[in-house]
Amino acid sequence: MARFLGTIAGLSLSSAALAASFSSPLLARQNTASPCAQVAALVAAQPKDGTDPTVPAQLAMECLVSVPFHQGPALKLIESTRIYLQWQSTTAWLKDPPKEYAEKVRGPFDLWGQWENIRNKVRAGSYKNEYEFGLDVYELFHAPHDSHLLYVPDSFGSAFLFGRPMSLVSVSSDGQEMPKPYVQQDIVDESLGDISWTPSPISKINGQDAIAYLEDWAEHGRYHDRDALYNELFYGLPALSLAPGTFPIGNFAGDGRSRWHYPGPTTDFLFENGTTRSYENMATVQLPHFNNVTDGESLYQVWYTGNPPLPQPWPPIPTPTNQSASAETPLPAPGYPPPVVRQVDNLIRGYYLDKETSDVAVLAIPDFVSYGGHQSFQDTAVEFLRRAKQDGKKKLIIDLQHNSGGTILLAYDMYKLLFPTLIDHAAADRARAFEDLYIAGTEWSRFSKAFTRTNLSYEEDPALYGQLQIVSNWLNYESNLDVNSKPFPSWDAFFGPVQAKGDNFTNLFRWNLGDVMTRFNGYVDIHGYGPLASYNTTPFDAADIVVVTDGICASTCAVFAELMRQRAGVQFVALGGRPRPGLTQHIGGTRGTQGVSLPGVRSIANDTITFTNSSLAESQELNKTVLGQYWEQTFFDRAALFSAGGINFRDAIRDGDETQTPLQFVYETADCRILYTKPMMVDMTALWKRVAETAWGGKNHCVAGSLGAGNSHAGAGANRLRKRELTSEEQAFSEQMAQWRRGLKVEDYPSTSENGPRKFKSRANGGALALN
């Protein structure tokens, strides 16, 4: 495993190397207390003002590697992961991926071989500390780069979150030259006229070539595509719009999965103009307290033994006032123009462009809503499309930047809002077929036979509503259709199994969007079905739509993209990416169609035993099967705080693919690649205008590929924007947009160097870093 970790990123050192590199003579001379005791003292000394305490990153790392290895509990933990990993749908394909995927995306990964390696190292007592063991367990789940697959052990991720006090951006000087990395605040200052000097690109980071360093660090991200991972490193307005005031932004700064990884004691930049800057990296203390922690062993005993001393309730329950304010106050969206219509949490927004692109509407969808907000999302989409047609808009850009997924039925609904007459699927699903799933599905299907398939609200009958959650689930075979859109006759007919690559899978199946109970799987009525069956409006032709992504498109987003490209023939633009020539993929995140939380997997087993039968004797018999293993708590007791984790439950298999290759392992590029430029870092319309000009304006901003009649998909160039006089309303709107641009201010774009009441200050050219 150590050799494997070394290949993941040049910065992912083995724990032994980390421990050796963290011997700190300077700290030892200044303070003879253990690293964890020093952390406890710093935590106690910081004000209790609602912000999380911070400590130097190096000290936090020294504390982590000082926790001694405990062989018995470690063996129990690694063995407890097995029953959850068997639900992961892609293990056979990870071990033997298609040739093109292996060459262009990722090579083979033997998950079960790595699992065995870790268990053998535990049995041999090879681990030097708990952190080294926890890192290996974490990487077992992370290495497939499936954003549905995650588990964070406590010894790796509970105590600290690491970060840097700056974000970066990657921009091209003219939209044609390959992009270079810059400090984000420098570009904002330059773009808005706040400085008189020209920012210089970063040439080296910590003494290493900057691009090589960034590509290595990007491997800490969750996506499989390397260009999507590279984009995930950087500050972006779509991410900021979902959580303004939340820091950091970009995986380089400590966002996403990189927050668990030690970035070294400092971040040192050498710029192309010869100047330098150095920043001290910090760690946020995530544990509620460090009481009774005096060294590594006491940290283990207090926090890593499965019964953490959490305050009750934990996390603190927000007050009704805060909840109400959050629900009623729209979030700001820095860098975005005033919207025509938007959902209050910025999950979906509609905009118009101005001047020569006044015929263009833009629908920005950075999220498909995981919890709550489904109705407001749908209402916003419906209202914007209605108003866009009413206002005479002729073209539509759909911006999916930073969309990591959400509720899958919203993907189908968005597609059917645009193309109600087209086929409602582009792929079918399947799951691994093994004993645990067979027993659960058998019982859930049997239980469901006693109920009539009906739509029911919680208020009408709370008890029945709970039972119908099982009846509506895909583990009841009656909730699914086969690939010929016919019902399955039985659970056995659904289950199969079908063999592929030495593994067993269910038969292919699809959503039954017309089923009255489908809305239970996300509380969404889909246009063209049920109460919305009369909807039949096609607001824009496929040739008049372009979809934009930054490769950070996963799960539900990938389902929507598949429908739009394969069924509607809409063209796609991929943005940014590594500074290498050529096209990049428009879907760089997981293309699995259902991720299930690890507690959700356990609930399937537990509910099968306790909920789907009518007698204690039946429950006792089921408890003797493999499902009885899921009562074991070790796996969850040893999980990091605030990290539920998950697995990929269902693969997507493209319609007509006789090889039945999961879309996760299909390499597929966008039609056109456009690079980010400096203006796009402060004004999203600068990006949208480039897309519109390329798709319909007779210009070509693609650095690879093309949009238009020469493309294999529907010819966007066949229906170009026509030059015309603007109406008085459009002239007034263009002036409003000009006023908005003139009003943009540096302070509208918060950076990680402004992290609440405690601010990280850089030390330029050797100055001291202060932590306020």
Image (spheres, helix red, strand yellow):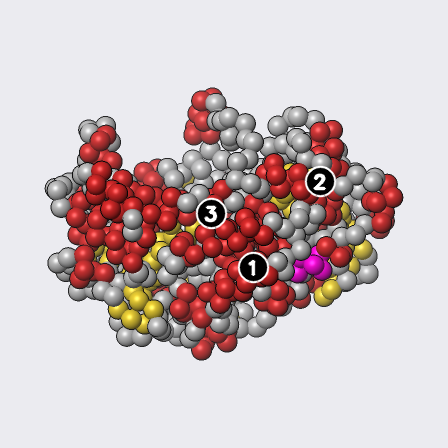
* 84 relative to 154 in the view: left or right: left
Q: For mark 2, what is the residue?
A: 295
Rendered residue at 52%/36% (across/down):
307
Query: Which of these two is toward me, 95 or 212?
Result: 95
Q: Quadrant of the N terminus?
A: bottom right
Image: 527 above or below 174:
above
Decide whether residue 550 is among the magenta residues. Answer: no
Q: Amino acid at mark 1?
A: Arg
Q: For mark 3, what is the residue?
A: 635
Q: CA distance from mark 3 to mark 1?
A: 18 Å
Q: Disc 3 on helix, strand or loop?
A: helix
Q: Disc 1 on helix, strand or loop?
A: helix
Image position, residue 123 (x, y; %): 56, 59
Q: Mark 2 and mark 3 in contact? Answer it, CB < 8 Å.
A: no
Q: CA distance from mark 2 to mark 3?
A: 25 Å
Ranked by sequence position, the earlier of labels 2 and 3 is: 2
Q: Quadrant of residue 729?
A: top left
Rendered residue at 38%/44% (across/down):
631
Image position, residue 633 (x, y; %): 44, 43
Mark 2: few/some/many CA within 10 Å (<14, 14-19, 20+): many
Q: For mark 1, what is the residue?
A: 123
Image position, residue 148 (x, y; %): 43, 54
Magenta stretch, residue numbers = 14-18
Mark 1: few/some/many CA within 10 Å (<14, 14-19, 20+): some
Image: 66 above or below 571:
above
Image position, residue 124 (x, y; %): 59, 61
Query: Which of these two is toward me, 75 or 590?
Result: 75
Rendered residue at 17%/64% (across/down):
484
